[in-house]
Amino acid sequence: MPQPLPPPLSATDTYLLFSHENLPAGAEQALELLIACLGDSRPGTWLAALRQRGWLQGFKAETLYAFAGQLLWHIDLKLSEDACVEEAAALLQGWFGFIRQSDPRQLNTEFELLQQSRERSASALELARRDSAGQPFSGLDTQGLQALRALLEGLPGREHGHWQLPAVDPLLLADLPAARPQPLPAALKVSDQLPGARQYAALYLRWHVPSPLRQRLHAQLERALQPLQERCERVSVQLQFSAAGEYWQLRCAGLPAAVLRTVEQALAVMLEPPADSWLPCSTQPPALIPIRALLKQLPDAVLGARPAPVPACNLTQTHLDNLWQQTRWHGLATGFDDAALNAFGTVLQHCPGQGSAPGPLPAWSNRRWQHAEVPGSEHALLLFCPLPAAMEAAGRLLAQLLQGPVYQRLRVELQLGYAVFSTFRQVEGVGGLLFGVQSPHASQVQILDHLLTLLRRGVTLAPTARQALAGQFDEAAMGNAEVAEWAWQTYLATQPGRLDALRRS
């Protein structure tokens, strides 16, 4: 018997819980397909209907329990304050009813491609877990399709809303789009650090944006890119658009063909955002704990960026057009074969701004003490000690030797707080030692004093430490994202960028 929708918790945070019993075999994988349908925010879907009304702020659905024909799962839906929760629930029932009447084979076609994408991006631990549970990344078999029908019959459904099943997402296709090959722009450097056999590629684009409107326009473009970012997250593609100082950065990583299609769509949005993205938006991002807030501001601090007055005006497409005329860009591609690079030559013909070379690294002549306004009552401190690029290997070795002593002294013995770490970090092309502490009782000055006292003691070089660290920088032992990010940071540092050279040093 179909179950009624549970009552929401609040007007903005709606938590819906669903339970099922006596489902046939294959129900857990059938629920994976259903959750994939619910997470699709393209036009014609439930999430698209919520976004069109200006209500959607966040969505998450996941399985909580699955055993012997029993399923427990939930939807965590975040809506705007002016949203009608009852209408959102009615639309969900309408979407359930529409899916129930749809051809399950059509649903399964995209789900199979989605599973293939998930398998390519899954960690070794996740692959092992699914293998031991007998749940491979695959589409539904005949038994699974029967379980899907039974699952849908147990959900509330009605005729409400106007729905359409989107076609298979092009971001799931492994073949390159047909395009006339064009030479790559001189502003794009190609790195061979990611072998093609990995079937993982990354593209970094970086713009120098001197316009005083860059902060406000970055927020507008972030909002405009959100639907594409949701699609990317669903199909295991990483798309990030960030800002630091006078720079904007776009990073896209995943299956090479998917990266190519994603970047093409992202650049089109960045050149001319949809009309609704220019509407005022009062939504504020959730507050971060102090140490995370400092980490978010670290790139600005490394660049020496200072807050600048932001002109007050109603932003329009003309402001964005003028901004792009003033910008210069450069980038890095890694993991792409020749065919994909030829296709990228066509895509980057539409990259906004003028091509250029990387600029000089920020200069560090002495110590800097930078205070950041962050929420929360606890104290937090980041200590970043930059090193010349030629000393990266020595810096990484020192950071590894310091990890144990820093944690033992500050976290265990002094009990300064729960957020205590030390590492080597590359930020905006600048590598260095990074220490972080968040404490409910020690002040920033006290934290710094404890750190400096510890650093004055020095460290003991264990005979095996150098060899162990070198093994971590064997390309075959590194993760895809780790190799790509190292290549990008080394490129920003205007260094040759060879992992084998770092390992030998």
Image (cartoon, rainbow, N blue to C red):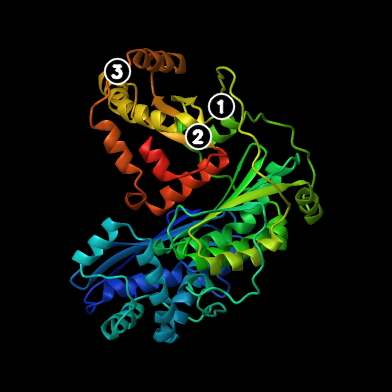
Q: Where, by quadrant of the figure, is residue 398 drawn?
A: top left
Which residue corresponds to the image point at 31% horizontal and 27% vertical from the top-left? 401
Q: Nearer the viewer, residue 359 or 407?
A: 359
In the depicted view, which residue is nearer to us: 136 or 426? 426
**Alpha-carbon neighbours of circle 3 within 10 Å: few (<14), some, or many (≥20)?**
few
Residue marked by disc 2: 293
Q: CA distance from mark 3 to mark 1?
A: 25 Å
Q: On the rendered structure, is 185 left or right of 141? A: right
**Residue in the picture at 51% in, 41% down:** 490
Circle on res. 372: 1
- Label placed on residue 414: 3
The quadrant the N terminus occupies is bottom left
Do the numbered discs 2 and 3 sit on residues whose CB atoms are within 8 Å? no
Q: Quadrant of the C terminus?
A: top left
- Nearer-N-terminus badge (2/1): 2
Q: Residues within 10 Å of mark 2 (few under 14, many from 20)?
A: some
Q: Compared to 38, does 7 lie above or below?
A: above
Could you tell me how far apart the alpha carbons at marks 2 and 3 are, in whole angstroms? 24 Å
